[in-house]
Image (spheres, coloured by chain):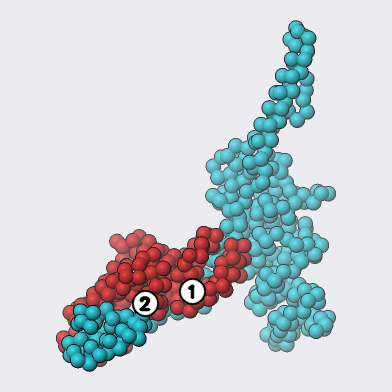
Chain colours: A red, B cyan
């Protein structure tokens, strides 16, 4: 993940002083990545947008609490991860998987790449990701889609590097099982 | 390397975390182990498939909504921070005055000849008269009409029958409203407490165009000099009104009020946006005037480019076009 350390600190300082422009710049800088993260965590575009906005509102109210122990990016992703967990807890009983997201079984023994048609890949991947626990998904999404080093993921999630590796390992095992069992995999063929 | 280590190191490699030695060791192991090669292939396939999931992107609508939300949050926080300075000091001063009065009374009583205290009348002590002390009520605390309002705006109280008194010779305006009883706040609009109350009334409390217009008019009249520096709360509230209010008349009044302040980068940005996108030509005319006046003092590229664009835009209203052209002539580059 690209580091913009001192610039980010300047922006936080401006936000502390009540400068709307500082928050606007922070939004321009981090909203794309945070939206990608929340979208994959929640599998729902509307919720992802709401949670991303919530992150920036929280940044405005908590800018004075930032203690510099973690990088600003890690801090933002930590707020986003917590907000996603809260949202999922809140929506747990109201969660509906769209019909089109439910994939069909595939023929066994075929290679992964060749059996997934591009139009249905997204649905298959999202369906698979939704079967991971929040903890596993957070770690995997940050590593796979954000290219975050293990140490930064650990900082973001407040866990050890070893725990990060374990979560990613288990996530990958779950996904492999999900795909190779053929339950939802070739929706994509 | 053991076959049991392969998955972990393979994942490290895919995540870009494996060091050179681990990668070499993994390659050497895979070269001689068919099972691990297959496992590595499956992991790579999985990693690739995950990568086919397209990224969500920030749409212009989402961006615009979010930036508006951020701005509103700042405004809300400014209003929420409304805490008159005298709030905690005044009760202490009152208590101190009463104690002092009591002490003086006691000393006087002791100094008088025996028996005379029962016949003499009490000596009045300056400053000892009891004063109304603010008592909190739901959402809003009572305010005396001496300007020492103790208002808690965090709970978004609803003020009704708001009226304004123009500035007195000291520049103090009056704001009256009903909560549970009639309240009056008196002070100069540049004082933070009064500024926050005005910003609150304008951005949160006013529901009709008339209410907004009256609040704006009070500010305009006060800052009518064209060189005053307004409080950030008032500038933010007026800027939001100019950007978003659906009523063109209210936007025009907000533009007039902003134009009466010493121009800041924030005000300049709001006027540049209004010049481009406000549907009311009268608002755009105010924007041209304000921007031109500011550019005369310190020409800036964005202002000059916007005025040039307007001066030659065939779709633009004739008055705005002419105004932009003459404004440009008056600016020395």
View extreme (left): residue? A108
Residue name at image x 76 percent, y 66 percent:
B262
Figure quadrant of residue B308 = bottom right
Q: Which mark is residue A31?
A: 1
Residue B128 left/right relative to A184: right
Q: Position of residue B279 (x, y in %)?
A: 65, 75
Judge by depth and name the residue closer to the eye, A16 or B32: B32
* Residue placed under numbered mark 2 in the picture: A143
- Can I make out residue A108 in this image? yes
Residue B76 left/right relative to B318: left
Q: Position of residue A182 (x, y in %)?
A: 19, 81
Q: Is residue A43 above or below residue B139?
A: below
> Label 1 marks which chain's residue?
A
User: What element does badge 2 sit on?
Assistant: helix
View extreme (top): residue? B115
Q: Quadrant of the C terminus of chain B?
A: bottom right
């Amino acid at each position: 993940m690209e580091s913009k350390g001192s610039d980010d600190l300047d922006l936080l300082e401006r936000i502390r002083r009540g400068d709307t422009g500082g928050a606007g710049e922070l939004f321009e800088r981090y909203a794309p990545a945070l939206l990608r993260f929340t979208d994959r965590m929640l599998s729902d575009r509307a919720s992802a947008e709401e949670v991303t906005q919530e992150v920036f509102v929280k940044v405005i109210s908590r800018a004075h609490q930032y203690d510099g122990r973690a990088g600003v990016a890690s801090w933002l992703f930590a707020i986003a991860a917590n907000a996603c967990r809260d949202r999922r807890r809140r929506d747990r009983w109201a969660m509906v998987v769209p019909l089109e997201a439910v994939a069909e079984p595939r023929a066994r023994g075929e290679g992964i790449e060749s059996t997934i048609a591009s139009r249905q890949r997204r649905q298959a991947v999202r369906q698979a990701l939704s079967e991971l626990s929040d903890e596993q998904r957070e770690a995997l999404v940050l590593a796979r889609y954000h290219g975050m080093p293990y140490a930064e993921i650990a900082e973001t999630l407040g866990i050890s590097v070893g725990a990060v590796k374990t979560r990613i390992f288990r996530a990958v095992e779950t996904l492999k099982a999900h795909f190779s069992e053929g339950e939802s995999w070739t929706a994509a063929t | 390397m053991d076959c049991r280590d392969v998955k972990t190191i393979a994942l490290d490699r895919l995540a870009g975390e494996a060091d050179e030695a681990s990668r070499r060791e993994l390659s050497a192991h895979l070269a001689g182990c068919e099972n691990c090669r297959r496992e590595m292939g499956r992991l790579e396939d999985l990693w690739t498939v995950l990568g086919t999931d397209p990224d969500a992107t920030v749409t212009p609508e989402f961006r615009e909504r979010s930036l508006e939300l951020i701005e509103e949050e700042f405004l809300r926080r400014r209003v929420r921070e409304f805490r008159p300075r005298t709030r905690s000091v005044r009760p202490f001063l009152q208590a101190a005055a009463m104690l002092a009065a009591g002490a003086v009374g006691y000393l006087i009583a002791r100094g008088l000849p025996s028996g005379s205290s029962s016949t003499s009348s009490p000596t009045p002590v300056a400053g000892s008269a009891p004063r109304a002390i603010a008592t909190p009520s739901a959402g809003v605390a009572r305010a005396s009409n001496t300007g020492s309002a103790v208002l808690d705006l965090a709970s978004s109280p609803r003020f009704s029958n708001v009226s304004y008194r123009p500035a007195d010779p000291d520049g103090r305006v009056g704001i009256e409203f009903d909560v549970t009883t009639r309240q009056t706040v008196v002070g100069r609009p540049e004082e933070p407490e009064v500024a926050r109350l005005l910003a609150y009334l304008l951005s949160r409390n006013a529901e009709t165009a008339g209410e907004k217009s009256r609040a704006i008019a009070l500010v305009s009249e006060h800052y009518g000099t064209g060189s005053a520096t307004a409080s950030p709360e008032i500038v933010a509230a007026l800027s939001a009104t100019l950007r978003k209010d659906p009523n063109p008349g209210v936007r025009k009044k907000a533009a007039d009020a902003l134009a009466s302040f010493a121009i800041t980068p924030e005000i300049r940005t709001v006027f540049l946006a209004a010049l481009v996108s406000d549907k009311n030509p009268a608002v755009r005319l105010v924007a041209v005037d304000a921007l031109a006046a500011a550019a005369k003092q310190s020409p800036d590229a964005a202002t000059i480019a916007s005025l040039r664009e307007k001066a030659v835009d065939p779709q633009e209203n004739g008055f705005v076009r002419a105004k932009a052209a003459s404004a440009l002539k008056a600016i020395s580059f």
